[in-house]
Amino acid sequence: MYSLPLLYSKQEVKSPVRHLSGKHFWGPGPAAADKTRGLVLGISGKEKEDDVPQFTSAGENFNKLVSGKLREILNISGPPLKAGKTQTVYGLPEGFSSMVVVGLGKKTAGVDDQENWHEAKENIRAAVAAGCRQVQDPEIPSVEVDPCGDAHCDDLKQKKKLAVSVTLHGSGYQEARQRGVLFASGQNLACHLVETPANEMMPTRFSGITEKNLKSASSKTDVHIRPKPWIEEQEMGSFLSVAKGSEEPPVFLEIHYKGNASEPPLVFVGKGITFDSGGISLKAAANMDLMRADMGGAATICSAIVSAAKLDLPFSVLGLAPLCENMPSGKASKPGDVVRAKNGKTIQVDNTDAEGRLILADVLCYTHTFNPKVVISAATLTGAMDVALGSGAPGVFTSSSWLWNELFAASMETGDRVWRMPVFEPYTTETVRCRLADVNSIGKYRSAAACTAAAFRKEFVTMVPHLCKGMAGRPARTLIAFLLRFRQDSTQFRCSKMPSFFLKRAVELQNTFE
């Protein structure tokens, strides 16, 4: 299905600075090469007009092995490679049937404040992905990749489902490569969950796949697949109001990674609508098939926690995912119905297609059971977020500037960018203006719908983070990077008075669907 390492998202490949060229050059002499191996090497761009483009250390070593012939070929084949461009070379010895040189851009490139990412890292990701695509051939199942100073790569698959093994060229960088594989495998898991058709990825199967992956990742884990009777005992009426229109039973998935059982956990909450028809407020038929991915938030947080378990992090992370379908039937909720959430608040449901906030409301109430250090909520929540930000970034709602800064820094490192959205009081006012209940599930006006959706959930938890993006498995890598940053700075979260502390430590990540 994928023709490049899943570490590199669709958005990264589409970026305008990363189109690839198709230069080919045949080197001198016959190649006594292993016909099953390919090689990708990097070369930086010019810093000044009279500079000579520099190979990476792996590229320089290879050039020495072939007595400078690689440099000679590049010098006579045209202008220096720009960022994201590729040049294929055949005929060089040292055991490779073909080799691709990729342009990495300027070595001095750093954080781009306009794009909110690290330009050098993005150039490396895009260049290596382009080089791997270029070198792929049915007869080359093995590709060695230059680490290029940022060794994140994983296995590939050909379009014809031919497996391609990717390894690092030369010694060193193995620890970084292992981390890259871990990031990519987390994203792969999220991709698998969201891409599987809804008739196969029901709540029970989603739970089973997550349990299998988590149990195999670490012995410090625990999984509870809570059935409908348990949900009823917890008086999660808001969640059940969404699930009752479907023949598929709802599941409340609770997964624990117990890195430090003596301290309160970080809590990740993910929206888990395995198919969203809109319910009685039925969606338009066009593109409704994409609603199989309306459990992208749950997929993201589960894959991040599986990765946390593999990393053996020294703190605990809890994942909570309400899983169900939103379907129309004689039992389904109707516009104008009033339902009661776990905390006792009543909710007037004026649009059954605004279901994500309903299932999350009960879960956010439940998080208080664990006295959490931080709550991060991830969801494909509103089409309004697509209007606001398109595919550029998920929106983030939080009252904690410290937490925003940590999440933002993690996103620049991974390239899965995020953008902060406002949580002003007028948005809350919109949700509490209600004739029949304590709060309304949608704002009185259509304006600022993403902000009022965040304000609605503020009524059920002091504040939360919101994160999700399409079918690319984003932002699993950003959440993993955030956990790694948390490991380095975990002492900041030690506090005996969690309720007041919790006011400052919650975030919500929001994206397109619903």
Image (tube, rainbow, N blue to C red):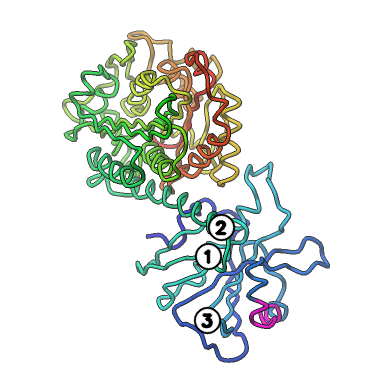
Please tell me whether residue 64 belongs to the stretch shown in magenta.
yes
Number of residues whose C-alpha sits closer than 10 Å to that of mark 1, classed few (under 14), some (14–19) or many (20 or more): many
Label 3: which secondary element: loop
- Look at the image and tell me in which quarter the C terminus lies: top left
Decide which of tag 2 and tag 3 comes sooner along the chain.
3
- Seen in the picture, residue 463 relative to 472 is either above or below; the reply is above
Dot 2 amino acid type: Ala
Q: Which of 82 and 152 is in front in this view?
A: 152
Image location of residue 207, percent across then percent down: 27, 39
Q: What element carries label 2?
A: loop
| Residues rendered magenta in the picture | 63-73
**Horizontal side of residue 72 vs 150, given as left or right:** right
What is the distance, in whole Å, between disc 2 and disc 1 at their CAs? 8 Å
What residue is pinned by disc 1?
A: 168
Q: Name the residue under label 3.
A: 95
Q: How many labels does the image show?
A: 3
Residue shown at 34% from the left, 13% from the top = 343
Task: Judge whether 375 appears above or below 143 on screen.
Answer: above
Disc number for residue 151: 2
The dominant secondary structure in magenta is: helix
Which amino acid type corresponds to the residue marked 3 in the rendered image? Gly
The disc, 3 or 1, on the residue closer to the chain's N-terminal end is 3
The extreme bottom residue here reads: 29
